[in-house]
Every structure is written in C-alpha cells, then in structure tokens.
Amino acid sequence: MNTYFPAALLAALFLAAPTAGATPPDGPGVPGGAAVPAPTTVRLTVSGPAPATTAPSPEATTTSAPAGRTVTLTCDPAGGDHPRAEAACADLDATQGRVERDSDTACVLLYDPVEVRAEGVWQGRPVSFTRQYGNTCELNARTGAVFAF
C-alpha cells in the first residue's frame, strides 16, 4: 500500500492551518477580526488603617478601626463600582495584571498599617493578592489607582 499524500492535498492542509498570531476572521461581535479581550473582574478590599496601638488616656473614648471597604473592578470596558475604574484598569494593564509595582516614591515613616486584598480574574488569568503596607502613602505608591477608593 502506498502511503504518500498528493501534493495538492498537502498544500490544502498547509494553507488551512491557522498561523501563530493570526487574528480570527470577521464574525458577529468581532469587528475587523480584532481579538476579544478575556474578561477582567477583581474584588478589591482595603482594611485599615488600624486603631492606635497605644493605650488611650482615661479621658479618651475608645474608637474602633475603620470598617473595610470593598469594590468590584471590571475592565474592557472599565466599570464596576470602583470610583477610578479607568485608571485602575490602566495600571493593571501596564503591569500585566500584577497588583503591585516598583516605586521610588518616598513616604513618611509613619506606621499606620493598611491591609489590602485582590481576588478575581485579569484577562482570563486568576488574581490573588494580599499584602499589608505600613501606611496609605506606601499603598498608593506601590499599587497606583488599583486600591484608590
């Protein structure tokens, strides 16, 4: 039995195979063959600053720690209940979905801890981030607009 393929069949198979980086053909919801970005939905929580660590004076009334704040951020298009959704999505896109980035901002050495959490999906990839920062200046310098709410 002869096991060769005719040249015309091989050429047809080669031409029909998708190429790396090719855009999909035009279709419903895909104008001009543009790739549709994977969804981004991230739940963001900020807790703190924490209550004072020193004992209050007898005359002072005790205060409780500020309640945690939670928002949902969606991107492509920017939305959710994050007040700076467009800037937060731009920051995530600039860092390839990493919540934290390098910063050379100098912050005051005041310890007033803030804990943050991000859980969700950025462009189809899972996001899970928890960190405590020494103060809100450090938080803003390292996370940009992501936790600015």
Image (cartoon, helix red, strand yellow):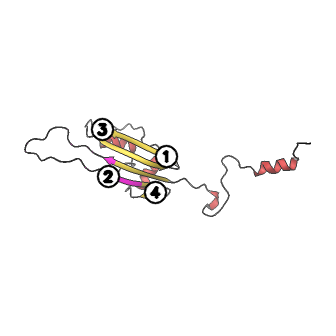
In this rendered view, identify the residue nearer to me: 90 or 52.
52
Q: Secondary structure at mark 3?
A: loop
Crowd class of label 4 (few under 14; some 14 to 19; many from 20; radius 10 Å): some
Question: Is 139 covered by the magenta stretch?
Answer: no
Residue at the extreme left: 59
Query: Which labelled disc corresponds to residue 114?
Result: none
Identify residue for label 4.
78
Query: Which is more foreground, mark 1 or mark 3?
Result: 1
Crowd class of label 3 (few under 14; some 14 to 19; many from 20; radius 10 Å): some
Q: CA distance from mark 1 to mark 3?
A: 26 Å
Q: Secondary structure at mark 2?
A: strand
- x, y percentage for residue 78? 46, 57
Which is more N-terminal, label 3 or label 4? 4
Q: CA distance from mark 2 to mark 4?
A: 19 Å
Q: CA distance from mark 2 to mark 1?
A: 22 Å
Q: Quadrant of residue 2?
A: top right
Residue at the extreme right: 1
Q: Looking at numbered disc 4 in the image, what kind of residue is underneath it?
A: Ala
Q: Secondary structure at mark 1?
A: strand
Query: Which labelled disc corresponds to residue 69?
Result: 2
Q: CA distance from mark 4 to mark 3?
A: 29 Å
Query: Which is more foreground, mark 2 or mark 4?
Result: 2
Identify residue for label 1.
126
Residue range highlighted in magenta: 46-72
Which is more N-terminal, label 4 or label 1? 4
Q: Secondary structure at mark 4?
A: loop
In this rendered view, identify the residue nearer to me: 15 or 4.
4
For image coordinates 66% across by 55% down, the residue present is 24
Which is more N-terminal, label 3 or label 2? 2
Identify residue for label 3.
134
Q: Quadrant of residue 4?
A: top right
